[in-house]
Amino acid sequence: MKNQNLVLIGMMGSGKTTMGRALSKELNCPFVDIDEAIVAEYQQTIAALFEKGEAYFRECEQNVIQKYSQRKGIVIATGGGSILAKSNVTNLKENGICIWLNRSVPDILKDLNPIGRPLLAEGTEKFVQLYEERLPIYQQVADITFDNSGSLKDALPKLLKIGAEQKWR
Ligand code: S3P
C-alpha cells in the first residue's frame, strides 16, 4: 500500500480510530486521525470549532482532509461527517481506498462516548436521524464495506485478510 492510503469512513462510534490505529500498527505505516489533526492544526477542540458554527468546522475539516489526502501509504480515520462534502470524497479517493466500517445503531449507542461530540448533544434521536441520512452516502462512497459489529480482536484479522487479498502490505 505504498502508493495508496486506507481511509476509514463511517458513523461516530463505528470504530474508525481504534481500527485505524490497529491497522497502522499491523501494516507498519503512519496513522492520521482527521479529528485529532484538526485539533492540532487549529489549536481548538472539536466542540470549540463547532461553537463557531458547523459550517466553520466543516471548512477546517476540508482543509485538513485536503492536506492529508495528498500523502501516500498512510491509514486515515475520518470524522463521521467527512463524506458529506463531495470535495472531501474526491480528495480522499485520489490516493485512497475507502473502507466503510458499518456498525449497527444499538451497537454504537452501547459504548459511544458523547464527550467532545457536539452532534450528540441533541440525543439519540438525532443520532438515528444522522445514521439514516448518511447510510446511502457511506454505501455509495465505500470501496469496501466492512461489518464492524464484533470486537476489535475479531475484526482486525478479518480486515487484514481482506487486505492480504488486496495486497495492502
Ligand atoms: C462528526 C463526527 C466526529 C467529529 C465531529 C462531527 C460527524 O468524528 O468529526 O464531531 O459529523 O459525524 P468521529 O466520527 O470520529 O466521532
Image: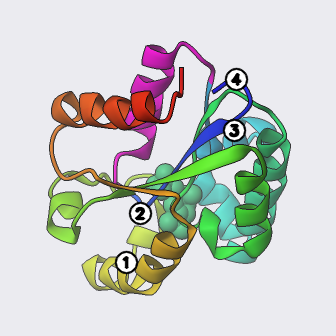
Q: Position of 164 compared to 81: left or right?
A: left
Distance from the alpha carbon under mark 4 to that under mark 1: 33 Å
Task: Answer with the quarter of the image where residue 120 lies.
Answer: bottom left
Residue 44 visible in the shown view = no
* Quarter of the rendering occupied by the C terminus: top right
Mark 3 lies on residue: 37
- Residue 123 x/y as whole percent: 31, 77
How many residues crowd mark 1 within 10 Å: few (<14), some (14–19), many (20+)? Answer: some
In the depicted structure, whether residue 100 falls above or below residue 84: above
Residue 2 tag number: 4
Question: Residue furthest toward the top?
Answer: 28
Q: Which residues are magenta?
A: 13-30
- Ligand 1 closer than 8 Å to label 1 CB: no
Taking the spot 63% from the left edge, 20% from the top edge, the residue there is: 30
How many residues crowd mark 2 within 10 Å: few (<14), some (14–19), many (20+)? Answer: many
The tag earlier along the polypeptide, 2 or 3, is 2
- Ligand 1 closer than 8 Å to label 4 CB: no
In the depicted view, which residue is nearer to us: 148 or 168? 168
Is the Cβ of the residue at disc 3 closer than 8 Å to that at disc 1?
Answer: no
Task: Answer with the quarter of the image where residue 32 lies.
Answer: top right
- Ligand 1 closer than 8 Å to label 2 CB: yes
Give, as a three-letter code, the residue at label 1. Tyr
* Quarter of the rendering occupied by the N terminus: top right
